[in-house]
Structures are given as C-alpha cells and as structure tokens.
Image: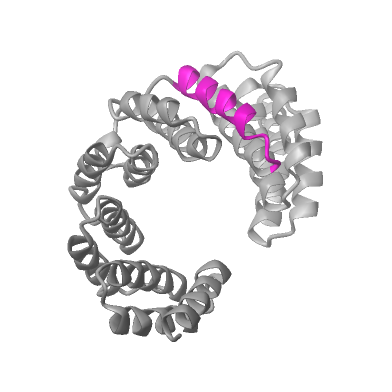
Amino acid sequence: MKKIICLIAAFVLAIPSFAATFQEVNAFIKEKKWSDAEKSCRELISEIKKPADIFIAYNKLMMIMRRQNKNAELIADADAFLANCKNDQHAAAILIYKGIAQRAVKQRVESLDTFKLAVDKAKDGYSAREAAFYFIDTAPSVKKYAEAQEMYNRAAKFKGADSDARLHAAGSYAFFYDRKYDEGLAILDKLDAIENLSVGHKETSLRYRGNIFAYKKNHQEAIKCYDKALELKLDAYREGRITWFKAQSLEKLGKKAEALECYKKAAAYKGDAYFQRNSVMMIKKLEK
C-alpha cells in the first residue's frame, strides 16, 4: 500500500513540472510578455519528447514570434520543426505560419510554395482552407492570377468552404484583378449567402461589387453598391475608401458637384493617406 501511495505521489508531483511550464507560457502570453513567453517556450521545447506536445509548443512559439514580428527567426524555427515532423496536419499548421512570415519579409513567391504545400498536406477542412486563403490572397500581388483562381476552385470544394467568408472574398479579388468580372460577381453571391455575415465582409462584398460595376463602366450600379456600403456602421478608413470610390463614379458620370462633395468628405477621413492624398488632388482639379 505504501509503495502504491509513493508511486501516486511521484506521478502527481511529476505533472506540475511539465504542466506548469505550459501554464507559464500561457501566463506570459495572456500578459503579453512576449520575450518571456518566447524564452519559456524554447525551454519547454528543449525538454519535451512527445510529438503531440512538441507540436503544441511550436504552435505557441509561432504565434509568439509573429507577435514580436520576428519573421526571419520564425521561418528558421518552422524549418526546425518541419525537419522532424511526420504528422501532415501538424506540418500544415506550421507551414501556414511559415508562409505568413515569408510574405512579411517580401518572399511572396516562396510563400506561395509554402501555402500550397500546406494545402497538400492538410488536404481538406479548416487548415486547408486557411492555407488556400493565404495563397489566394498573396498570389495577385505577384500577378499569379491563374494560380489563385485554380486554388480557389480547389478550395471551394473543401469542408466548410460554403461558410468561409474570407475564402470567397479573396477568390473574388483574384478573379476581379484578372478582369473576370462575372466570375468575381458569382463568388460574391456565395459570400452574400453566408448567414450572419460580419459588417466587414458586407462592406467587402459591396465594395468589390461596386468596383466591378465601375470597371464595367456601369457607374449607376456601382454608386448603388457604394451607397449601400455607406449605410453600414463602418470605421473611418472603410467609410473614406468607399466615399472615394463613389466620387470616382460620380465624376465619370459627369456629376462634378456631387463628386467634389464626396472627395471633400473622403479627404476629411484620416484613416488612409492614399485616399486622402488623392482626394485632395481631385478637389484641386475639380475646383479649377
């Protein structure tokens, strides 16, 4: 009996020394003490042996490194984990972090390969959609429109894709910038069909629709979309951006007085230097 009690006591005492390290990392994360969290997490990684626990620790480390904007170090840490990882789902999660870090250090082409590998390993479900989203979101910046569209068509078949607003928003963007406007609008229909769509995604859908109509030179429809967007409770940045697009369409219709009013409103918003600067330029042009 005494021997059993001693064994139980030894087991109970052993748990806190391991669990407390995770608790310590979590406590530092909660307090946003990122440097301390990183140090503690690295100590944890050096001690644990089980693959599942190693993955959890590295997953926390990835987030900690992102918070500190240590992207180059994150890429090296991800490679260290991936060198010994035999679980495709675990690899996919870490690859997503690596791809985001590569994108942050302007390695966009390399990040596409990383995101695609993550999709291939995840195969389906949330991680696959997440990796696909980042691929689609990144590809147009390096003019890989066809690749983005191909990835969207693949990802649209994943589990949960019907309710993935970010995926559809990124997909519509990829088709829009390749001037495939009808395909872009069809994807926005999928976006709008999602229940309880956030204000941000409603604004995105209406803005993209408005921009598509504007590029198709249907400025009346574009303005209707922009007006609907302005009825939403938007932050200053989004409201200023939408107002600027509306001013563009009004100007194209020859409604200079209304366009001038919108440019003045857009110039008053402090959320984005680009729209503010261009609004000021257009005000000077129309007031001549």
Viewport quadrant of the C terminus = bottom left
Left or right of 114? Residue 265 is left
Viewport quadrant of the N terminus = top right
**Height in image: 227 above or below 90?**
below
66 falls in the magenta region: no
**Height in image: 128 above or below 88?**
below
Left or right of 247? Residue 24 is right
Which is the main secondary structure of the residues drawn in magenta? Answer: helix
Residue under the point 82% across and 45% down: 39
**Height in image: 84 above or below 4?**
above
* Position of residue 210 measured from the top left corner of the image (x, y, whole percent): 27, 58
Left or right of 161? Residue 2 is right
The one nearer the camera, 138 or 279, is 279
111 falls in the magenta region: yes
> Which segment is the magenta one?
105-122
* Position of residue 187 measured from the top left corner of the image (x, y, whole percent): 25, 40
Residue under the point 30% across and 66% down: 252
* Position of residue 101 measured from the top left corner of the image (x, y, whole percent): 66, 39
Residue under the point 59% across and 28% down: 95
Answer with the quarter of the image where residue 142 lies.
top right
* Name of the residue lying farthest toward the front: 288
State whether residue 3 appears in this view.
no
